[in-house]
Image (tube, helix red, strand yellow):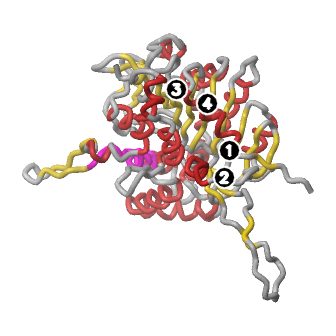
Amino acid sequence: MNINTHDPSEYIRGIQQILISDKKKIGFLFGAGSSLAMKNKTSLTVPAIGKMTSEIVEEVGKVNAKYKTALEEIKEELEEKNFNIETILSNLEQKFSFIGKNILNSLNKDEFSNLIKIIKKEVREKVSVHNITLCDIDLKKEFKQIVAKDIVNELVQTDFANWIGQAERKYPIEVFTTNYDFLFELGLEHKEIPYYDGFCGSLRAFFNPESVEDFSFLSKQTKLWKIHGSLGWHYDMDTEKILRVSPDDDDILIYPSTLKYKESKKQPYESLIDRLSNFLKQDDAILITCGYSWGDEHINSRIISALKTNTTSHVIGLIFDKYDKIDEKSNVSKIGLDNPKVSVYASRSAVIGCNYGKWKLKSEPTKDDTVNLNLYFDEDGAIDSNEEKNKETKGEEVWTGKGEFILPDFGKLVTFLNSMVSDNEIKKLGENVKK
């Protein structure tokens, strides 16, 4: 059987040309995986969903024994492999919606409501990694403070901001993210990169949907679109506006549950998802996804719908599947197989031009080539060609060309981006965007 293969060295050249071009409209869609990336042991990260789930379940159980029992019962209902923050919140919200005056999992309607609020508060706490808690001994009080600049300097997001700031482009970089945390804000501000996120004003910054629709608004500034909301976003009853203030328990966010599809049709989320769609409807737009599993159907449908218009745009999905390999039948592979404008780059396989295949180099790289190759591809070791057993013959190592494509790791992607920026390239591409 002929097994189709893709040579990563061929496709990486195209990506490099796109990223150093000042004519392409370049956007990124980052999911939860980008908040897990570590530059070193001091890097701030948001817990992965498994760790976040176990920590929140343990902490909620300490609040009330009834909540602990309810979550244990729900875990048994869902089965352990399906038990996570998203399924827990979905389960609780569904039961809350139809429980009436009855009792479920030993909880009444008010207790379900309170449990949901507590879990959401815990989620906000887990993603608030920008804060450190300090204690004033004299006042016997605890207070929060934004982490010091030396910690911010060690963020992968700060290195990403460094790449953005290296050259002036005709079109600004557009960053879309489903994350609530402030890691991208910390990185951009540390590198003094001006950016716009849809809010105008200073004292009580308000969300301005008209500016989000207008591609000419602040046309030179980097854009940061938080399509599931952010810490500090509030709905103000008095002004009937979305305001950006200090984060607290009233933050408006699209939490991970089945209700997120309903919530995404409200403001400000509708304007932000429209921006993603309209970005892709432009000619010569490239959207690179990283840390995004393609598990949000309301986002996927808008991406695919936008690409069906008469556009020359393309999406490159970098899929981190190191521990759970995708194959030809995986949902994300099917998206690539059905859409010539979507390429799927996973660790061991790819879907390019609607063709599924394994990564494999066509020719063995030289020592000089290996330096560049190591930035995006980790070659497998050579194998022993002597397959005959029980013979005293000397085997010979054979180069296979196979290996792991490493750019789906957000940290590796950022290293790759910065590797393209040399002193000469900076001079060619223009003055620093901070001028």
**Front of the two marks 3 and 2:** 2
**Front of the two marks 2 and 4:** 2
Q: Mark 2: give few (<14), some (14-19) or many (20+) Cα within 10 Å.
A: some
Q: Which residue is mark 1?
A: 9
Q: Amino acid at mark 4?
A: Gln
C-alpha gap between disc 4 and disc 1: 13 Å
| Residues at discs 2 and 4 in contact (Cβ within 8 Å) | no
For residue 48, above or below residue 207: below
Return the disc, 1 or 3, that comes first in the chain's sequence.
1
Dot 3 falls on a residue whose secondary structure is strand
Q: Nearer the viewer, residue 180 or 189?
A: 189
| Quadrant, the N terminus | bottom right
| Quadrant, the C terminus | top left
| Residues at discs 3 and 2 in contact (Cβ within 8 Å) | no
Magenta span covers which residues?
119-132
Q: Looking at the magenta stretch, what is its main secondary structure?
A: helix
C-alpha gap between disc 1 and disc 3: 26 Å
**Front of the two marks 4 and 3:** 4
Q: Position of residue 240 (x, y in %)?
A: 42, 18
Q: Which residue is mark 2?
A: 365
Residue at position x 75%, y 19% in the image: 309
Query: Is residue 362 part of the magenta span, yes or no?
Result: no
Q: Nearer the viewer, residue 201 or 292?
A: 292
Q: Nearer the viewer, residue 128 or 236?
A: 128
C-alpha gap between disc 2 and disc 4: 20 Å
| Residues at discs 4 and 3 in contact (Cβ within 8 Å) | no
Q: Which residue is mark 3?
A: 174
In the drawing, does residue 184 fall left or right of residue 48? left
Q: Position of residue 173 (x, y in %)?
A: 51, 26
Dot 1 falls on a residue whose secondary structure is helix
Q: Amino acid at mark 1?
A: Ser
